[in-house]
Amino acid sequence: MSVSSYATPSPALQREVKRRRSFAIISHPDAGKTTLTEKFLLYGGALNLAGSVTARKNQRATTSDWMDLEKQRGISVSSTVLQFEYKDCVVNILDTPGHKDFSEDTYRVLTAVDAAVMVVDAGKGIESQTRKLFEVCRRRGVPIFTFMNKMDRPARPTLDLVDELESVLGIDAYPLNWPLGDGPRFRGVYDREHKQVHLFERTAHGSYRAPVSVKGIEDDSVKAAMEEATYAQVSDELELLEGAGAEFDIARVLAGELTPVFFGSAANNFGVQLLLDRFLELAPPPVARESEGGKIEPSSAEFSAFVFKIQANMNPKHRDRVAFIRIVSGKFERDMNVLNTRSGENVRLANSQRLFARDRETVDDAFAGDVVGLVGNYDLLIGDTLASAPGVMFDEIPRFPPECFAYLHNKSTAKYKRFRDGLAQLLKEGVASEFTLLESSGVQVPLLGAVGPLQFEVLQYRLDGEYAAETRLEQTSWSLARWLKPKEGDPLAPEARPSLSLGTALARDSNGWLVALLPSEWGLKTFEDKNEDWIISEQPFAP
Ligand code: G4P
């Protein structure tokens, strides 16, 4: 069968696919991502799950004690997927770890979403982690919706917040609603599309839906609800906004060029439903994905999916390995036989689960847009394509160039095998990547690269906890890696060598490509000048 069989639309699937919305919530730590997720779940009627999210945040022991590191550091290292139904939609929220150091995993999750909600702390504006995550979404052209959170606290001037989206992130912004004051003077939001006011009434701390009343901006009760100065200011701002005459262009939203902006307070559950309802209407259902032989449409009859995350030992009681797949097209059925198009092997997808931290539920069927956890020792790698017919291979999941490099010493010779086995598994999961130095004397100690230092900490912690292999980390001074190919000749030829600058070393990555390890951006410039006959890439080359 050829790729063309993937193009055949299946009306039966179309409805299921069309009602799916798969997205991630991205933010700088503490902007309110967890709180917003919890409120979304509340609207989906998934109250028990909402409770679990809080539990995860507050007493991590209840849901993610498989990794005590999370408890110690108060961060979320793993990613899970939450699914719930709301109105006629099946909502998949792909949770991303929020710590600034541990971003490679987050980046991979972002390859599996169709849209993103960006939460910004309105008192702080765009922060560093938000910017990084935004860039990853933009590179993929993913539509981004903005939620300006914490309006119940003193916020930056509203116009500045909107300007900043344009000046700092370089994305056009279209506020769909506008805040009526901020901090103690926050009275609600004005819905520009429907020309309605939603008044905010303070309630018990976010424990139930905030009552909203809907009126026009000129309504006397709206004037009465606000201090005179606030009302005057909001009226001026709105006039300015309307005067600017910008059109809301959904095509530009879907192309990732324009971000709809909402204001509210997640903790007080205010503005959350406005965001969720409008987001579900505007965000795209699962989109077609590029494959080697052409685009694969989500509602085609054939099943296809790709692996975007692998995690071993999520549950110490089971000691198993979970490969998370994002379904790109068709319908998933438990026990189905599919092809791993990389290895050419047939795989029976017997143990398919939906995971929420430690809770697991067997999945019998799922559709394009959904995420399924395959539990067991499937021989899968990140980026693999699974398909019910040959001829499909999805584009590589981008690797992110490491910025930290360290030698990992095994502390006990007696446990060398465990150390190597554990390391091999964790490298397969993409926790870090290994490099082999070309010029090195004596025993080779594994040299590892990671995007952030926390990845090393996770690696050491897991080697110790899951493989009883104690290790010691020896930092190096390199902070950049560049992949190298001569412009002419065999790139893998052993004698092909660029000219080195001070402090630079040559290594090979796990696919055999030459890599230059450099101490700084400044060193890079010299290196590039010296090696004009080489292709110098920030991204690893394909295997
Ligand atoms: P994160 O997942 O992005 O890291 O943020 P999270 O939701 O955990 O929120 C970080 C802090 O900000 C929490 O406070 C949370 O309650 C608070 N927060 C979230 N939304 C709002 C909001 O709309 N208004 C205000 N004033 N605060 C908000 P915390 O003190 O860390 O935890 P907690 O004791 O409140 O649970």
Image (cartoon, rainbow, N blue to C red):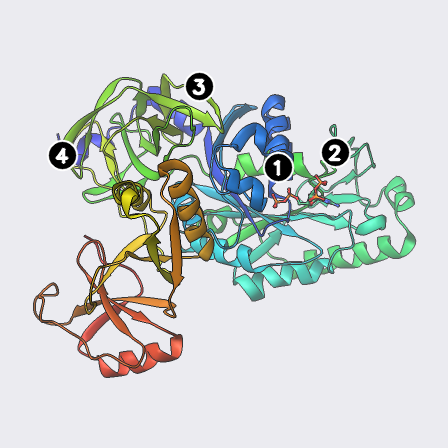
The label nearer to you, 3 versus 1, is 1
Which image quarter is the N terminus in? top left
First-in-chain label (3 vs 1):
1
Q: Is mark 2 within 8 Å of ligand 1?
A: yes
Q: Residues within 10 Å of mark 4 (few under 14, many from 20)?
A: few
- For ligand 1, tell me if the residue under mark 4 lies within 8 Å: no
Which badge, 4 or 3, comes first in the chain's sequence?
A: 4
Residue 227 x %, y %: 90, 51
Identify the element where label 4 is drawn: loop
Q: Earlier in the sequence, mark 1 or mark 2?
A: 1
Vertical relation: 521 (above or below) 100: below
* CB contact under 8 Å: marks 3 and 1: no
Amino acid type of the residue tagged 2 in the rendering: Gly
Which numbered mark, 3 or 2, is in the foreground of this view? 3
N-terminal-most mark, 3 or 2: 2
Q: Position of residue 353 (x, y in %)?
A: 39, 23
Q: Which mark is residue 344?
A: 4
Q: Which residue is mark 2?
A: 206
